[in-house]
Image (spheres, rainbow, N blue to C red):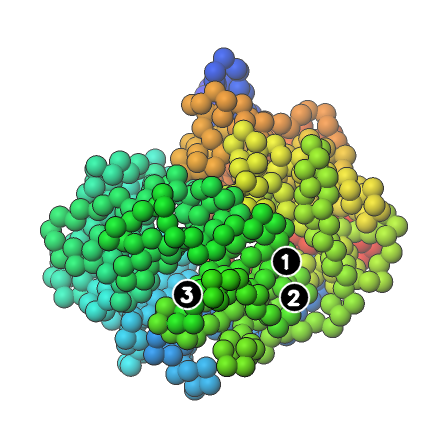
Amino acid sequence: MNYKSIAILILCILIMQCKNKKELVLAPINVVVDEIHGQRIEDPYRYMENIDDSIYINWLKGQKENKESVVGNISNRDNLKLKIEKFQERTPEKISKLTIMDNDVYFYLKENTTSKVKKLYSRDGFKGEEVLLYNPENFDNEHPYVINYIKPSWDTSKVVIGLTKNDEEFSILKILDVKTKNLVGDIKITNTLPTSLGGVKWLPDDSGIIYVNVPVIDSKSKKYLHNSEVVLYRFNDNPKESPTVIFSKKENPKLKIKEEDFPLIYLDNQNVEYIIGVVTRASRYRDTYYIKIDELNNKKIKWEPLFKKEEKIKRFIVTKDEIIYMTSKTTPNFQICKTSLSNPDFENPQVLVYENTKEVITDFVITKQGLFFVKIKNGVDAKLYKIENNQEKNIEIPKPSGSINVSSKNENSNDLWISIDGWTHKKETYKYDYDKSVFIPQNLYPVAEYSLLNDVVVKEIEVPSYDGTLVPLSVIYKNSIKLNGENRMLLTGYGAYGITDKPVLDDYLLNWINEGGIYALAHVRGGGEKGDAWHKEGFKTTKPNTWKDFISCTEYLIDKEYTSNKNLAVWSGSAGGILVGRAITERPDLYAAAIIRVGLLNTLRSEFAPNGKNNIKEFGTIKDSLEFKSLLEMDAFHNIKDGVEYPAVYLTGGMNDARVAVWQPSKFAAKLQKANASENPIILDIDFDGGHGFDATSNKKNNELADILSFALWQTGHPDYQLNR
């Protein structure tokens, strides 16, 4: 009798035994042993990495039923969803993907609270009449599609639309004729990821587009997401002929592009002389190449090296013969430099903005009026500056903000916009009036305001970590709350890829505050809050700093009586699964509950997942003995211990997730359910149609949020959120 037959028999017996008891069925065990650098590694759930395994699928279905029977019976869960939707109704028109063209035509997606479908609109100028261009509900009668990407042509006569279904992220590209509002019927481009892989670029004369083709999009294939290629599609080509590959591993063997790398193109200005090509991985720094734009007409394109990833260039703007860029090569908080493209010299560039050791440069833009840039202190205090007479001039913004994004049409335009975010206000957009030196509100629709935030206290603290390093910690709560150690708290963090967790009024914060709780965010190492060095201090062999910082912040919050271990829930997602997973496995006594959305929890196996090799740059590889030890230490799955009382845990995953394999949360849940010595529930909620969550419908997102928050409120002792028995 083979493993599968025995497992099916055991699973059937367990299901029959548990049917009337409503007990959770544990996953069958089939131990696989690896010998890695002389160390024995046991994996009892390796079979789950085959997502077609019938045992695994049946177990997942049982987990889904368990989730419904538990979370579906939390009192007031449905009322909480209604509250979430009521808050969203304060913004009856939700705008995204706003693109303002050189001729002042606005293109954007708009979703209202009645239809909850993102539709494509345009208007001539800020005050122009709004025109509906396309409704994705008309695309397919059998499957619901959403628009997840738009790219207007330079002359604004056409728009590339990305359409995706079921949160799959992969898009079908169609061309919309703006005048007729019809899709161009004979153009249908598949196998694209425009939201993640560089988007779509129009040729300067609008005669074609450049995009990234992903040959294999079947997540079960070993070649999944491998050998992606930059493709030039000219509209006058014979439709029966394949588009031209212009940048790829196969076409450019001398560039030594790896199969897991993603070649991308930058062409964001109609008047540039050069096209930039980059080879990207899970890293902010990339090997970069360039060609003259007229070389696209050549049968064989020869990409010339521009700069290597060792230059640590994070962002750049190309203008005619110059490249202006942010670099952390010798300045971890970044400086802004300039060099020629016809004769580039990255060793001796012209420095436009020097590094500030207390603030991190995060964004910049160029207009006809000069160079504008943003600096942020500790990831939460943002300021806007301009270079004037070779000096930095601070420009006062409308209100204190934790995040500023700057944008302009191009370097020859006077237009400058900023978008600001904060803990207590939604995103607001302003246009700068140079003559009056003031910002004029320019929101296409009114920004929602929430009276419950009028008396909110925001504390920005620095907490000593285990090694004395000061870790920024943001704490948000109502002024009426007493710090008596009895408050329900939701603590979050991320700490990976150098990403900065900036202040944002999201649905987690808003609804948690509304339920009388305290919300907090730990800006741990591995993120970008204190520059490139902060990232490298939570990276590969230094990764333990990430969760140890989080634990130190937790201890501080308990010691200062913001909360207690009985009232504290933590949450994160994706690579933040390492943060939460290791915090609760190292110090389970500190937490009442943990929520991990589509989390990375089995790092020792991550490089063997679809698209897993791409993350080696951030976390490491088992092929390296030192990195293997680090991967094992950051692996939450392998740090679960039998007989330990773990907090309540809620895990989610998506069968179509292109970023974190669904078996990552599954294996963690299976092992934790078996090992846990407490009565606290371990819930696994797998979306059989979903992905990473970016392109989920509003209703699906709201259902998930209601499930997660009601679970956290239940486990942290809210009297209105208890289990109905």
Disc 2 secondary structure class = loop
Mark 3 vs mark 1: which is more N-terminal?
A: 3
Residue 642 coordinates in the image, percent (x, y):
68, 24
Residue annotated with mark 2? 400
In the depicted view, which residue is nearer to us: 600 or 385? 385
Q: Residue at x 18, y 62 (%)?
A: 234
Q: CA distance from mark 3 to mark 1?
A: 22 Å
Mark 2 vs mark 1: which is more N-terminal?
A: 1
Residue annotated with mark 1? 381
Disc 3 secondary structure class = strand
Image disc number at residue 366: 3
Q: Amino acid at mark 2?
A: Pro
Image disc number at residue 704: none
Q: Is residue 150 visible?
A: yes
Disc 1 secondary structure class = strand
352 w.r.t. 223: above or below: below
233 w.r.t. 61: above or below: below
Q: Amino acid at mark 1?
A: Asp
In the depicted view, which residue is nearer to us: 387 or 718? 387
Mark 3 vs mark 2: which is more N-terminal?
A: 3
For residue 516, what is the image quadrant?
bottom right
Q: Amino acid at mark 3?
A: Ile
Mark 2 crowdedness (10 Å alpha carbons): few <14, some 14-19, many ≥20: few
